[in-house]
Amino acid sequence: MPESSGVVRFVVNLAASVVVLVLVVLSSAHAQSAERVPRERMTPAAAVGEFPASDPAASSPSARESAGSTSETSDSSTSAPSANSSIVGASSGATASASSGVTADAAAAERPLIADPSALMAASQTPESGGELALPPASVKFRGSTLFVVRDMLGPKTPEERAHAIEGRIEALTSSDAKILDRIQVQDRQLSTDVAVDDIVLFTVTEGDAAPTGRTRQQLAADYTRQLRYRLGLDFRERSLKGIARAGMYSALATLLLVVLVLLVNFVKRRASKRISSWTGTHIGALRFQKMEVLPVEQVVEIIINTLRFLQMLAIVMLGLIYLNTVLSFFPWTRAAARSMFSELYGAAGWAVGGLVGYLPNVLYISVIAFVASYGLRFLRLVFREIEKGTVTVPGFFRDWATPTYKIVRFLFLAFVVVIVFPYLPGASSPAFQGVSLFLGLLLSLGSTAAVANVVAGIVLTYMRPFSVGDRVKIADTVGDVVEKTLLVVRVRTIKNVEITIANAMVLNNHIINYSTCAEEHGLILHTTVTIGYDVPWKQVHALLIAAAQATEDVLSEPGAFVLQTSLDDFYVSYELNAYTNQPQKMARIYSELHAHIQDRFNEAGVEIMSPHYHAARDGNTMAIPEDYLPKNYRAPAFRIAPLPPAPGAVSGAVSGAGRDQPLGIGTDE
């Protein structure tokens, strides 16, 4: 299997190389044939502007000059149709060969041809007759390629308007056939030289057009005529059935090559991905910084594979653009679009590269600022970390202020760095960037009023130090342990494991009870109140309450519990038991256990807790304590009715009547 896979790769690479070579050769040959301008020979008569004998204007140069000037200075929308109609009508009687495409005479002297329009454009900028030209030259283009350049004004027409009109007339020639090329002639006049088809002037060459090139207007007109004949002949050949078939064949080869290259790119990407995956843990390891693992090996491999996938997509896109440009350049109708498309792409790439190169000094400034800022932040973090540990002490600065103060200083420091970096950002001075910044600032100022209030309240709470994380607090009606404290909110977990988020502004506007502040050093006093009747001695009640506190877990023995008699009410006395603890987080459990022990101690002593009110006739009811605490032989006494003793001096027979007048008393056996 390894040998067969190697053979397959060799065959695929060989086929791809052959296809690439063939396409490169075909594309180069086509580009050379499209861009090459032949050095043709012209008859001396044509070079000096000999006109047909049948031309009635040949004997009148002034009339021909006037007619030529009027023809070119007319608008292209009216001159092009008339030229087309005259050309089509005259083409039927032409006897010249259509396959030649140009007229050449072997005996004519060879004339040098100016084939580089950019040279003419540059030459036109040189001073002429001691002064600069008033208007810039204009290029005459055909199928996206420059034919020649016009520089001089002709009547009221500027060079740009002249070029536009000439392009329209040349485009009108393409509706005819190749025979029209033999009827393109150079006609010399007194002040200018015309290039015309029969009686239709295509364009005029003036002394102002020829002067910057160092040639006569007759020579320049001959050069322009050869250029025009060649480009039109090439266009006629490309638009023929044979030319279209050739372009279609080239397009098919380009498509085949594109498919092969895309498959090759995908094949290489797959093989590379498999090879990189097999290197996991061997050739490719985790990204480490000293002993800290920054990126695990799986993420490193994933990053490399994603990079390969990006390069694959980039290669396919580039191949697609090259393919599109190549195929469009094969056809005369789309060649101009191909050139303009790639010129736009090249222009955009050049602009991007130029902007990047011009931005390099700003990148250097930003890098230096970022470097200094990073080490400044490290220094600040080191200082506040040592303050938090207690290694560095600052008088009046508490250790728990270190972390929040570092966050505030870091925010201010980063804001200062952003202000410094802002002028070096791309587009920072543009009105659009400034407008967006102003708009965002307005939105933040209008929409963040509550957030800013919470931040300010958070800063105030930080330095007020009303509580710390882990403290048992009561904020408004919420009781629980503080689990998080930020610049915006405080999070409290209640004894029911419910987490409540409270905005710092609300915390600051309410009273805060902290049960943990003094618990460790002085102890937190837990207190509860019981009401006992007046018939129970208060010393006994004090002893029972203190015994109940001492039996409760997490209640401190030192300082010991104590009892306060808070009030003497109508039916009972209020006793308040106070006990110390250093576990405020266990308040609920301590209270519950303390209340249970109070009940046990009072029941064991046979003392009834008459709270809040207890109504009973005490001569016969069962005692108000659990049965487990009553004696085993206990029986509830019954009600007894007995006569009251007689009052002193009362007559003993006064009760012998109906008995209603005898006062009765309710008593007990005692």
Image: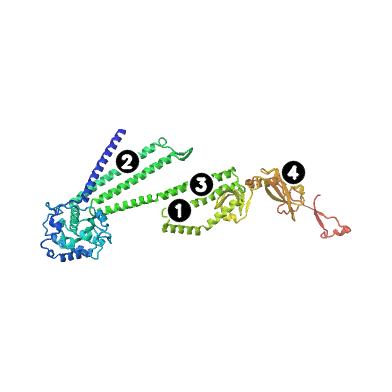
Q: Element at badge 1? A: helix
The image shows residue 557, relative to residue 331, as above or below, that is above
The image shows residue 156, relative to residue 451, as above or below, that is below
Q: Which mark is residue 376?
A: 3
| Residue type beneath disc 4 | Pro
Q: Which quadrant of the structure image shows residue 583?
A: top right
**Residue position marked by numbered label 2 in the rendering:** 267
Q: Element at badge 3? A: helix
* Residue in the image at 25% along x and 50% along y: 327
Which one is in front, 268 or 441? 441
Where residue 370 appears, x then y in whole percent?
46, 48
The tag earlier along the polypeptide, 1 or 4, is 1
| Residue type beneath disc 3 | Gly
On the question of residue 469 being in view, the answer is: no
| Residue type beneath disc 1 | Phe
* Residue in the image at 46% along x and 39% along y: 288
Q: Which quadrant of the structure image shows residue 174?
A: bottom left
**Residue position marked by numbered label 4 in the rendering:** 631
Marks 4 and 3, Cα distance to the nearest angstrom? 81 Å
- Count neighbours of disc 1 (C-alpha within 10 A) and say few if under 14, some if 14 to 19, many if 20 or more: few
